[in-house]
Image (cartoon, rainbow, N blue to C red):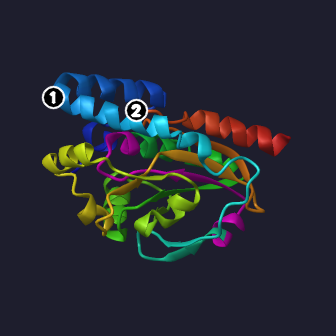
Amino acid sequence: MKWRSLEESAPSADIRPLREIFAERKELIAKYVPAETQTVHARAVAGLKQQRLAANILPVGAKVPEFQLRDHDGKSISSSDLLTKGRLVLCFIRGRWCPFCVGQMEAMNLILLEIELAGATFAAISPQTVRQSFFMRDQHRLRFPLLCDAGNNLARQFGLSYRVPDEQRAVYQRAFVNLPFVNGDDSWELPIPAVYVIDRDGSVLYASANEDYTERPEPEDVVHFLDSALSG
């Protein structure tokens, strides 16, 4: 259940736009993953879109719920801890087993300094356990906190959580994506991927979510938003 890191497979980091990295991964999936498996994943995404999950997430202008989560080292970190440093960029991801989450996290890692120069900090949240988060951070040389949202409790408050459909669950099990082991519970729940920018008072300045886990905001777009918010 290991997606090979870009830094492990190449002498330098991949600095292409995220959409190009994702397009390449989609091509590999189309080439090597059985068509019936791809159909199951497509049906799962279509089902989530019919539920309009992304249209009903915690919106711009809302106050985020206060939270206290353990990071990749097991250290307790609160939302107030993060917001004392300035604005907060928060990514909800599925886990280290997802190649698109890995690609997004490596891309965000590359622009971490730009985020900090724009007066913000960055953290990622997933339902995976502390141990899995530690492995992900170490394997992909990430330089930001990976926070553990046990049971998707915070994702649920943001309107992001859903239960994996039974037919997709069967596909994951055949592919050795053991979510009960990775997440430490048997709920088979995941968050749809989302990116938030949160102001120091806890209000949402920017919110982007997509039921399609193969589509994420460009990291540079997030930086541009931070820059414009800083100068505004």
Amino acid, disc 2: Ala
Secondary structure type for disc 1: loop
Q: Residue at x 24, y 23 (%)?
A: 30
Marks 2, 1: nearer the viewer = 2
66 up-or-down from 165: above or below: below
Instruction: For residue 166, say whether it is visible.
Output: yes
Q: Report the residue at 24% width, 26% height from top.
A: 28
Where does the image place residue 115, in percent across and percent down from the top left?
Answer: 63, 47
Residue situated furthest right in the rendering: 232
Q: Quadrant of residue 21?
A: top left
Label 2 crowd (10 A; few <14 / some 14-19 / many >=20): some
Residue at 63% x, 68% y: name it. Answer: 79
Element marked by disc 2: helix
Identify which residue is drawn at 34% across, 59% down: 138
Q: Which residue is mark 1?
A: 34
- Amino acid type at circle 1 is Pro
Q: Which residues are magenta?
A: 80-102
- Which residue lies under the disc numbered 2? 46
